[in-house]
Amino acid sequence: MSVSLDILIEEKIFGKKPCVFRNTGMISGIMLFFECEHKDSRNCYPSNLEAINLIPKYSEDISHAWKIVEKMQEKGYNFSCQQNIHNIKIWSLAEFSKDHKMTYASGDYKCLAEEICKAALYTIQTEEEN
């Protein structure tokens, strides 16, 4: 689970570009507000360290990972996931398929969100190579 994986999702799945987000203020010295240098953050993600926490935690939070599933479904992919027990260990599996081609990622059961990220990135990479 890493920021670099979440950045790849922003770029490869959602088509966003890196952008500098500037601090525009605070409330009670606690909450920071950031603004994209283009004034429209829908098509970009923060590339500077002070705003990196604004990138959704796709690889950690299933509610964010589900946005990947929805985006992949918009592109015509089917999705399935499952958990299996193998050698007394529980595994998660995320799978995308389209036109009789399937890509998947599997790992520790606690990481279904991460497996969704990996499967989606592998699917897009495979699509780009063909």
Image (cartoon, helix red, strand yellow):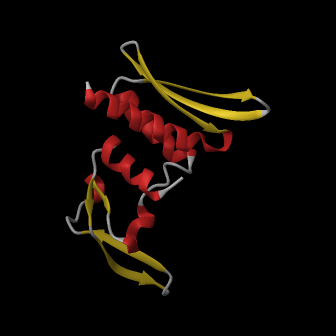
**Residue furthest to the right:** 88
Residue at the image position 74 percent from the left and 28 percent from the top: 85
Residue positioned 39% across, 46% down in the render: 9
Q: Position of residue 61 (x, y in %)?
A: 56, 49
Image quadrant containing the C terminus = top left
Where is residue 67 drawn, in percent x and y?
45, 41
Q: Residue furthest front?
A: 87
- In this orientation, which residue lies closer to the viewer: 40 or 19? 19
Where in the figure is residue 84, as x and y percent of width and height? 70, 27
Residue 21, picture quadrant:
bottom left
Q: Quadrant of residue 72?
A: top left
Q: How many marks?
A: 0
The part of the image, by quadrant, that contains residue 15 is top left
Q: Relative to residue 67, is residue 115 drawn left or right?
A: right
Q: Is residue 45 above or below residue 64?
A: below
Give the answer, above or below, for where 26 lies relative to 78: below
Q: Nearer the viewer, residue 64 or 18?
A: 18
Where is residue 86? Give x, y as percent: 73, 28
Identified at 63% across, 34% down, the residue is: 92
